[in-house]
Amino acid sequence: MSELVRLEKVSRRFAQPAGLTRRLAVAAGLSQPPSVVRAVSDVDLTIRAGEALGLVGESGCGKSTLGRIIAGILPPSEGRAMLDGARVMGEGRRPVKTTTRVQMIFQDPFASLDPRWKIGAAISEGPIAHGLVAPSEARAFVVGWLQAVGLPPDVADRYPHQFSGGQRQRVAIARALAMKPDVLVCDEPVASLDVSIQAQIINLFLTLRRELDLTLLFISHDLGVVRHVCDRIAIMYLGRIVEMGPTQVVMSAPLHPYARALLDSIPRLALEGDEAAFRPIAGELPSPLAPPPGCHFHVRCRRAAESCIRQSPLLTPRGPSRSVACHFPIEE
Amino acid sequence: MSPLLEARGLTTVFETRAGLLPAVRDVSFTVAAGEIVGLVGESGSGKSVTGFSLLGLIDPPGRIAAGSVRLDGEELIGLEQGRLRALRGRSIAMVFQDPSTTLNPLLTIGAQMRLALEAHGGRDASAMRARAIETLSQVGIADPAARLGAYPHQFSGGMRQRVAIAIALLNRPKLIVCDEPTTALDVSIQAQILSEMRDLARNIGTAMIWISHDLAVVSSIASRILVMYAGRVLETGPTRDVLSAPRHPYTQGLLDSLPAHATPGTALRQIPGSTPSLVDIGPGCAFAPRCARASEACASDPAESVAGNRRWRCHHPIAAVA
Amino acid sequence: MTGEAPLSAFWLEFRRNRVALAALGVVATVLLVALLAPLIAPQDPYDLSRLRLTDARRPPGFIGSGGYVHWLGTDAQGRDLLSAILYGLRISIQMGLIAGAIAFTIGATLGAFAAFRGGWVEALIMRVVDLQLSFPAILLALVLAALLGQGKWQLIAALVAAQYAYFARTAHGAASAERAKDYVEAALSTPLPTPRVVMRHILPNCLPPLIVVATVQVANSIALEATLSFLGLGLPVSEPSLGMLIANGFQFMLSGRYWISIYPGLALIILIVAINLVGDQIRDQLNPRLRR
């Protein structure tokens, strides 16, 4: 398998938006500059063609930001995001996305479809603009994609507000896939759906991925879903990837103490009388505005030592397929 | 021994332009003192409305159309507002998904806790302060005395939810209705709150109704479970029994939908169709259109079947495991 | 899968408010009457050859030399007031709509551009707009009308300058909110060119609040134009709008010939109140916080 997506030393900072008066005050030395969050810092990552990579972590860990960088919605503050050897977004002060080969699916299907556009027009807008289909053939094209996501053809003439969350998510998937992407970035695509509908959408992803030979970046906080869909998993904590490897291996025997703690804290369906179906992580998630020095996890980590405060561990390979960013990883 | 809470035939409807919406239909269950009962269902199943109905928190265009709710022998339905307000907080309290709906952003935590205590007859300032500190530490807030002076925005999301729970605990209610209290929180915070609530129920004997869409969460905290669908309780019984050997096809379908028990990469056994609109609920079983076991018999409403401590409503239940 | 197209659903709900429906009827009637003024007015008030000074300042109901009833009386030149009001409405509405449309276009474009461009451009545009909003519109229009001199287009320029800021402010707020929504990110990440996303996705979704502002601002510019004309800074005498009719009759108010001022005034009030009632209902329906 060849590598398709490559992130090189990607960082993304967000500054609080400052008004004119605030900026004048800062320039005159009368006020502190607004605080800056490093949502993603120094991430190196590759995704191979045809692979499904799961990106997991708690809120504020930067997984959505990283997804948006790969999808070409946000430019990285530093580093490069590459798709098949070319930048996803152009360079300059106001970079714009230059490729159609990566598309994105959002968490909230109620927000990701323009309420004023009929479903059919929404699906065919991009393909027509990019010459993937002639306007005269748009109708058949739309119907084809609606069928592919399990919706009847008459849906094309309706508005998004006439549909349930699950149906809208199908439309959003059709809209993204109609651009014939190689890579699909899915940001919590089933999190806002009911349990019984989640399974339908997951099955749809599995089918489409196989049929269209898609490469998936699957962002989720639900490890059960990630385990089911993804070949490989990357776990993030406060802007950094702390562990990466094959999903099954990482989830059964994580190397990073945070990965272990995260897995333990998820309640499992308690069927066989085991009382402790989950174990909470000690302490609170630190503010991303002021992450602890060194390894960000050291304040909550039982294995932490002096060196964890002084030096932040780099993501280093462990064996052929795994890597971990920890001075004292859990031994196999 | 009579149960702490007993709901009988609870029915709550909403009058909308589209017609009469039966959000909760003929729901009956009991909660014993110190017990945690889980209420699971998807959106529109009526689980939250059931919780609100118990506290009389149904505002027009909604109303409780029928049924009875007895708390410690006292009938709550039809109770005058003043008496109901006196009971709320003191005997029965509620914790919501979003703590910012219950916390006043302009008052310190300490002031809000004092108000909650005064509302139920608290007089002695130092005793109230001591009680506030005690409940804050019960929900795992470090340095509670210092935190009394803080405002809600100075707490993180998980901490705010803890404060909301502490306020619910203040007047030592016998029952707390928890409506998705951990859904908006991160998994690590959810785990902390789940384990603290479990300990609270065990140590101070507070009963809880835990409303959630997450089967795993409910299974880890509740000893008994009610599975709701389209306003109706389809199945109820001890959590482990229900989840390991469900009798109702819907419960089985929910369990099958979870990726946790499937072989990775294989198709999940999904429930077809979508959750029904409550407006066009017919007389029969609401789940029948999505059910693989459905037959003509399902056009009529299934009566409740009872076996031991388990109950279900289905014409074609899954056979019990021997 | 129930529901109608958004527009017909909107109309169904609008219909439920009887007052707003009646107001809409009034607005439609006034528009129609103003449009058809040359066909339905008993007299052409600008045809000076038809005017007789013997008919001047006659009370309502007077039958003049033309042989027809002056239902609302006549003015100082012997002009039939009903005809003058119909023609005056025509001019007032015309001014209001033209000024409103230009202010809408300039303001909405400026506001949406600022929201999308961000940075110091946004800050500069919006501070200028804020500065202007802190100024009474009437004062600005007065100064401009005095500076630019009399004339239809000079007056429109003054009205636009006094009003575009409301559109800019509203468009900026709405566009900033829409811009942050997922569907805009989805469109940009397709990718589609930014101007296309602004024109075809963002602006249409900003329309609801802008339409509310537009209804109110058309009413305001009609009132503003009437005020300027009343003060003698408005249109030339050859195109008497309602404001000038009111001004012309004002000197006769105390001598008991009330009708020369009162009836044009009433016409103005009815029009402005009706437009505002329609605008209120639209606002209520479009404001999600007021929706049930």
Image (cartoon, coloured by chain):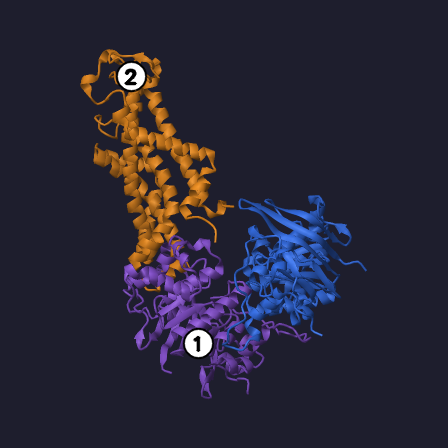
* Type of amino acid at the residue the image marks with label 1: Ala
Q: Is residue C228 visible?
A: no
Is disc 2 placed on a helix, strand or loop? loop
Is disc 1 placed on a helix, strand or loop? strand
Q: In the figure, residue A271 lies in which quadrant?
A: bottom right
Quadrant holding the N terminus of chain B: bottom right
* Type of amino acid at the residue the image marks with label 2: Thr
In x, y percent, where is residue C261? 33, 21
User: In the image, is B271 to the left or to the right of C61?
Assistant: right
Q: Which chain is orange?
A: C
Residue underneath mark 1? A52
Residue underneath mark 2? C74
Drawn colour of chain B?
blue
Q: CA distance from mark 2 to mark 1?
A: 84 Å
Label 2: how many Cα within 10 Å (few below 14, some 14–19, many 20+): many
The residue furthest left is C49
Q: Nearer the viewer, residue A43 or C182?
A: C182
